[in-house]
Image: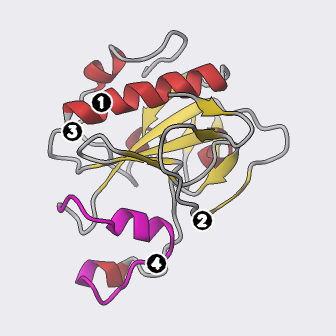
Amino acid sequence: MNIDLATNRLDSVPYIASPNCDARPRDERIELVVVHAMSLPPGEFGGTAIERFFTNSLDPAEHPYFETIRDLRVSAHVVIYRDGVIKQFVPFDRRAWHAGESRFGERTRCNDFSIGIELEGTDTEPFTSVQYEALGKVLAAIRQAYPTVHAVRGHSDIAPGRKTDPGPAFDWGHLASRLPDGMSTA
């Protein structure tokens, strides 16, 4: 797996364009990867709800929870599903709308300098081994293409008190064993 620097996309995964992105600030270097967890409806896996959410095509009448998120406009660069399937929604050189109000060290507005990776899951259920394997491959490709990326953090790390994902079920030690040289989780 590699990133095509002409398109800033993974070369071997489906690309579904999300309108929920914009240009990064001029001369902003990508330095951070933010790991998220999401399932739609909450606690349910499979299907296309996350994809439809990121492309603003989720039918609010389909499930009561969807009505509560109908006006949200969010995205992540990449989603890794429970079965290890990877899909990309935003090119890495664009700013995905994944972190919201956030802080990394002394810097705010993490969307400006981060890549968002969404794992299909919840805070309380273990993630699958194929998700960790896929995440490791995506991180290796990111590090190869963007050597300024050095940190991997959870959404809860950059938005404490506001976000809890990827949650206590996420195995940071397992991920640390798959990180490419030059990247850290701490």
- Front residue of this view, candidates 14 and 186: 14
Q: Position of residue 35 (x, y in %)?
A: 41, 40
As measured in the structure, the alpha-carbon distance from the residue carrying label 1 to the one carrying label 3 is: 8 Å
Q: Give the spatial CA distance, label 3 vs label 4.
A: 26 Å
For marks 2 and 3 on the same chain, the one whose residue lies earlier in the sequence: 2
Which residue is identified by label 1?
Answer: 132
SS at badge 4: loop
Q: Mark 4 or mark 1, which is nearer the start of the sequence? A: 4
Amino acid type, callout 2: Asn
**From this viewpoint, is residue 105 visible?**
no
Residue at numbered disc 4: 57
Count neighbours of disc 3 (C-alpha within 10 A) and say few if under 14, some if 14 to 19, many if 20 or more.
many
**Label 2 – label 4 distance at C-alpha:** 12 Å
Question: Mark 1: which secondary structure?
Answer: helix
Estimate the x, y position of residue 162 in percent, counting from the top left. 40, 55
How is the protein colored in the picture? secondary structure
Task: Please report the residue visible at 75 percent of the width from the left and 38 percent of the height from the top.
Answer: 6
Which region is colored magenta?
A: 44-65
Q: Residue at x 63, y 29 (%)?
A: 31
User: Mark 2 vs mark 1: which is more N-terminal?
Assistant: 2
Q: Which residue in the protein does label 3 denote?
A: 127
Q: Is residue 39 above or below residue 143?
A: below
> Please, is residue 185 above or below residue 87 in the view?
above
Circles 2, 4 touching at the beta carbon (< 8 Å): no
Q: Position of residue 165 (x, y in %)?
A: 33, 47
Question: On the image, numbered disc 2 is attached to which residue?
Answer: 20
Mark earlier in primary sequence (1, 3): 3
Dot 3 falls on a residue whose secondary structure is loop
Between disc 3 and disc 4, the foreground one is 4
Labels 1 & 3 near each other (Cβ < 8 A): yes
